[in-house]
Amino acid sequence: MDDKNISQAVISRLPRYLRYLGELKDSNIERISSQELSELMNVTASQIRQDFNNFGGFGQQGYGYKVNYLYDEIAKILGLNKTHHLIIVGAGNLGQALANYMNFERRGFHFTGIFDSNEKLYGKKIRDMYVQPMEELEHFVKENDIDIAVLTIPKGAAVKIAEQLVSYGVKAYWNFAHIDLKVPKDIVVENVHLSDSLMRLTYTITRNESEKEN
Amino acid sequence: MDDKNISQAVISRLPRYLRYLGELKDSNIERISSQELSELMNVTASQIRQDFNNFGGFGQQGYGYKVNYLYDEIAKILGLNKTHHLIIVGAGNLGQALANYMNFERRGFHFTGIFDSNEKLYGKKIRDMYVQPMEELEHFVKENDIDIAVLTIPKGAAVKIAEQLVSYGVKAYWNFAHIDLKVPKDIVVENVHLSDSLMRLTYTITRNESEKEN
């Protein structure tokens, strides 16, 4: 699979395909045409075919896609056929909420530990795990083959903690700290900057209002 | 300002400019050249100039940008010069975390109410507000001029609640429910699908690993 030139826009659409295919699977639907999928997802059938052609197609023309097969193939492209071991660093409001709210296991993520620098939290149990002190990070990461760290710490702490985690061998970061992490080239960062998202919303509200006025 | 043709990519970069300009403001820096801003933000100076040219420029060539002015202009484009009244619908883990974690006021958002259908939560106080029953939504939304609803409810409930809120006059939705809302054309939805973001991370992990193997 040569996917070096696949655009970020195509990649961003794959999780949505997976979500719809998962629902079709749950409803025991075995086959779907690109036309049906197009109506369900409210995108054009030609967009769907173009997206899938980036990965060699998946389906037979006029015969539709096999739902299970398509689901598995997209899951594979998204790396969900592999086991990922994940820790949450920062057991404040957001870290606790993600621990409780995200159904990590459903997608094959093993959530194995949660850490904080606030000793008042050490006794606290979150999803059957005690909050551990930051001093345990190095040992824990190396013992448990952790490949993803979820950073839900304030931005002041995030840079230093990310540097430490990189030196312990963690290669991927799901970063909620509102800062751009500076990391080596082989390290992967996916930012979730919630206030940026809220500003995109107010941008669109404002644009719609000014269009109405004109 | 004619911004109908401004690409989504440019819009998505504006909050990041605002973040860096806010930090410069906090450090009492009054002027910055596009070259300095470029180094700080790790994007090319030509990219910065192109982005800003979408909005008529902002700065004098060779003289640099006035930080305060630029901050205010970008904030205005993002609609942050107006007051937005916001409620959170769904007081579970994620709703509570957002209530406690987001610094809504800093960006001019008035967070005025939090709602849930679970009566066990009604007595609970979150950020000085009692969780209110869903039955209060209609009255509250109309009385308090609410323009943004944050949806942190399960996807099964989100479609119906969004429909109700639309009928009460709420025009914008910050949607954390893992579903595509079907809303009229003049309604604005910004989705935060956290598990989609996590999948983009595993996609990149997998791609990097397969590149290394080749």
Image (tube, coloured by chain):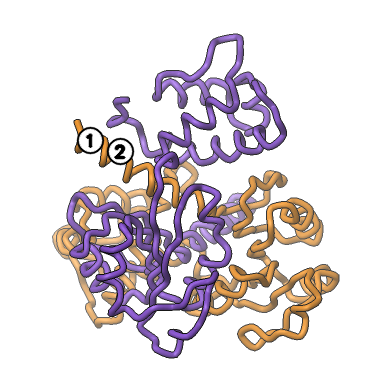
Chain colours: A orange, B purple
Q: Position of residue B62 (x, y in %)?
A: 60, 9
- On the rendered image, what quadrant is the C terminus of chain A found in? top left
The residue that appears at 28% across and 31% down in the rendered structure is: B4
Q: Position of residue B100 (x, y in %)?
A: 56, 67
| Chain ID of residue with mark 2 | A
Point 29% across, 65% down: residue: B141
Mark 2 lies on a secondary structure that is helix
Q: Where is residue B114 in the image (x, y as percent from the top left)?
A: 42, 71
Q: In this view, does B103 lie to the left or right of A135?
A: left
Residue that mark 1 sits on: A211
Residue at left offset 32%, top offset 25%: B1
| Among the 4 quarters of the image, the one containing residue A182 | top right
Q: Nearer the viewer, residue A103 or B59?
A: B59
Q: Is residue A117 visible?
A: yes
Of A174 and B77, nearer the camera is B77
Marks 1 and 2 share the same chain: yes
As drawn, the residue found furthest toward the top would be B62
Chain letter, disc 1 residue: A
Residue kind at label 2, given as amino acid type: Arg
Q: Residue A207 carries which label?
A: 2
Q: What residue type is labelled 1?
A: Glu
Q: Can residue A60 be seen in this view?
A: no
* C-alpha separation, residue under disc 1 versus residue under disc 2: 6 Å
Query: CB atoms at circles 1 and 2 under 8 Å apart?
Result: yes
